[in-house]
Image (cartoon, coloured by chain):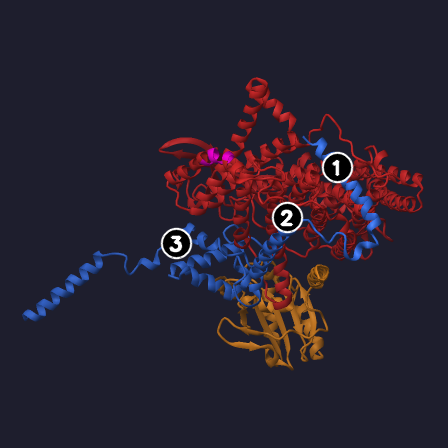
Amino acid sequence: MVADIGFGSLMITLIVSIYGLGAAYYGQQNRKELWVLSAKRAMSLVFPLLTISVGSLIYLLLTDHFEIVYVTEVSSRSMPDYLKITALWGGQAGSLLFWSWLLAAFTSAVTLRKWDRDQDFLPWVIIVSLATLIFFLILNVFFENPFIQYWQTPEGIITAFSTPPGGVTIFPRDGGGLNPLLRHPGMIIHPPMQYLGFVAFIIPFSYAMASLITGRSDDRWIQLSRRWTLWAWLFLSLGLVLGARWAYDVLGWGGYWAWDPVEISALMPWLSGTAFLHSVLIQEKRGMFKQLTMVLIILTYNLVIFGTFLTRSGLLSSVHAFSKSAIGPIFLAFISLTLIISLVLLTRRWERLKSREVLTSFFSKEALIIISIVLLLGILVTSFWGVLFPKISEMVTGQKVTVGPPFYERVAAPIFGGMLLIMIICPLAVWSYASFKHLGKLLWKPFIVSMIGIALPLYGGLTHWAAVVAFWLISFVLAVNVFEFFRRTKIRRKNQNDSWGSSLLYILKKNRRAYSAMIIHVAVVLMALGIVGIEFFQTETQGTIPEGGELSLASYTMVFEKLDIFDTDDARNVARATVSVEKDGQIIDVLYPRRDFFYDSNQPMTIPGVRSTLVDDFYVILIDWKTISAEGATFKVYHNPLVKWLWIGAWIFIFGVVAATWPDKKTKLVPVRAK
Amino acid sequence: MKKILLWAGLVFLLLVLVVGLIRSQQGQVGIGEVAPDFELISFSGETYQISDFRGKVIVVNFWASWCEACKPEAADLEAAYKFYEPRGDVLFLGVDYVDTEPEALAYLEEFKITYPNGPDLRTRISQAFRITGVPETFIINQDGIIAHVQIGPFRSLEEIKSTIDPLLDL
Amino acid sequence: MTNRLRRILQLLTVTLLLSAIIPGYAMAQGSEPTDDEVNAIAKQLYCPVCENISLDACGTAACEQWRNIIREKLKEGWTEDEIKTYFVDQYGDRVMAEPPRRGFNWLVYIVPLLVFIIGIILLYRAFQIWRSPEPEIISKKNSKKSADKSTDEYINRVEEELRKRSKG
């Protein structure tokens, strides 16, 4: 019954979307505003309608309706309720429905704004958004229906939505449950955040398409989509960071990023999205690079679709990928369509987007942003090639190869170093102008301070030259930003005879965008600090020890005090080790690494015990593929210096982006094309 | 000029994706297809080239010592081998997939397997047959054509015989 | 016994005693490799079956067997390169973390390099173009579209003015 409601609502949403698309197109072609208005109303309905579908599926999950195939695949009786809800996105069909639902949230939300001034955008925004939604709904309705059931027929057991001839519903007693790796708080927030980041880019994309189709060459579409872009970028960045955090917490290899093809598919739209964000900045300030901005948003949107295609089509294998599915071919058709259409539009309007502005200096803000965009695209192109190459190699030579972390790190590390270099100059650079004298005056004091960044590591005995350079760059960027804050506050204070506090508040409010950007860059640099720490200086050790035994690593010693093995009431068998951490003979912490074995899915998972400080993380895992007993348990220990700064930087990053999106008091006036 | 490059790049990308997708959906070599020719060097050092055995029925069984599902059929395969051995026109070959030699030899010892077995060096053979897991067995007829594909273990000695007998007109 | 014989016997005894006292030279190869030594090599290899997982992090029984192979080979005195070559011969190129640099695989390294160089060249040329205003706007093919263009240019100019005034 509930499944019928859920699927019915899904179907209705599809029909309403198709109607909306048709109505918008008809209304636009024949200049009949009422049709466009009707299409807008239709588009505002898709979110409530899909909410019914999603609600139904959640209900079925929570009430253990195992006759529904999806529920059996991802849920089980012993799972706690919050995990049953997250199981909504635990498998292919449900996560596609979840994706459509989030997409619908954005498309419906965009109908809520006042459209009076931008009537010529509206039909095209509706058409592009609904076209995308329709594609994903088709996937759900015809290929990956989350509401299909098990039926016992004379031929055997089949799965279908409606009753087959001679079919009787089967009610399995229990399901297989979520993969243990997914039974973690990370599952609650990482996929939703990641999907939000992906789907949110449909809004700037549809505005861009609307602008291209209507032949405009002005900035209106950017102004309209600016806040959407920032939020999309925030969600996407958060999705990546949360994924990294989850990997660090649960996967047990003491790392946070494996350059796995699916991870890279999520990174690529972020790279072009970041480039897009910065290019938008130049276009708004100086009217330049409109072509580039358009290219970048088209690239970002297509990379999102491409990324989800790679993950779901079975083309790649990875720990992340969903199991093979029939949706591959139709996905490929959709990507081809979006790529071809956006490229055709772009090439037809290419000349119109040319600007007459000139670049006045290599060290102006525009020039620096262009260079950073090129660097970001450099990583993007390399990653794209690295992901595709194994398939190409297999096709041409028949040999399977792995393109792994060394390949990507070799390229990403120097490029990120280059970006740090740019981040040193960019808070000081001005639009359309630069002079070495001016920059030099502002740079010499932070430069002196940044020497600490070389002196300290060298004093501490560091010899790895790349790490020293990285530390120096990081301290330089931090120093430049701090000095800039001080300098501007001081000027304001001098001019107004104000206190430090109110001066600071004033300049923060007056040029919020610039300061949020500085905060965001500082946050990124702090994250770089964490990354440098763990990438260059991680050490590890592994050993099998009995109770009372110990392992030493990097001036710490862990002692295996005791082992407890017990069953929990949510169908897990837990082996928990009590481990004390000593330094210089003193016990400084007690950790509890454990191994959970899930009876319903017959799979284990390990949770490390971690002691995390600003200086380093001491990370202990109980190895679950060897016997765990008091006589001997195998531990793997990692020492990860500075990695906490990665997460601290991420928090500051969120703060910076939220500050950037905070609404302005005044709204800006812009000319509207006369009809 | 740039336009041509752009479109060429796009076409190339789509081509790669299409071919890649087709391949990933392909599945194993099927009944009726010509069996891929390969060379197997057994653990005891003998070389077997499939094309040399035209005129015989060849049973190619992919297994691994770490494969739990392979164990039920191991004894049956040996029994089938022993059954057809006096005739001399059925060849049994075991291809050890991505395995380690000590464990493989121990497995063969445990199930007392006497027909030739060898490692799938560089996974060439399994790639040629496009297997998706172990155990999988391919029965090749006297003309070198795939006559039967068994995904998963054989359930009984009778089942094995039922796939080979028709080829020998039994 | 002759002096010579005694001498020889003495020499033999001393040698025997010495070889009993000085331990390990013959036994060095037989010592059990530590987990860390095994992992140092396993880290650089990838699981032949499950994709994109390095051999030291993989928890399957098969991976445990492969790590034991590394352990055995280390015990026998194989070098790291010899062990890696063995794995490639047994399981193919995909166990390496990067495609081996030969034949077709060169493309994976060369293409990004080429793109990078092309990118730098394009950037340089773009900077040249951007630094000097384009004379071509008026000439060539777009005379038909000049009507549209002038409206766009008008809008652009108005926007520039407003930009200059509103942004602070």
Q: In the image, which is nearer the foreground, mark 1 or mark 3?
A: 1
Q: Which residues are magenta?
A: A441-447
Asked whether C57 falls inside the magenta stretch, the response is: no
> Mark 3 belongs to which subunit?
C
> Badge 3 local density, few (<14 within 10 Å), some, or many (20+)?
some
Q: Is the N terminus of chain A in the top left, top right, bottom left or bottom right quadrant?
A: top right
Residue denoted by label 1: A223
Colour in which the image shows chain B: orange
Please state which amino acid type lies under the numbered disc 1: Gln
Q: Which quadrant of the figure has residue B141?
A: bottom right
Please state which amino acid type lies under the numbered disc 3: Pro
> Badge 1 local density, few (<14 within 10 Å), some, or many (20+)?
some
Distance between mark 2 and mark 3 Cα atoms: 64 Å
User: Can you tell which mark lies on residue C131?
Assistant: 2
Residue B41 at x, y = what percent? 52, 73
For the residue pair A193 and B45, the one nearer the viewer reads as A193
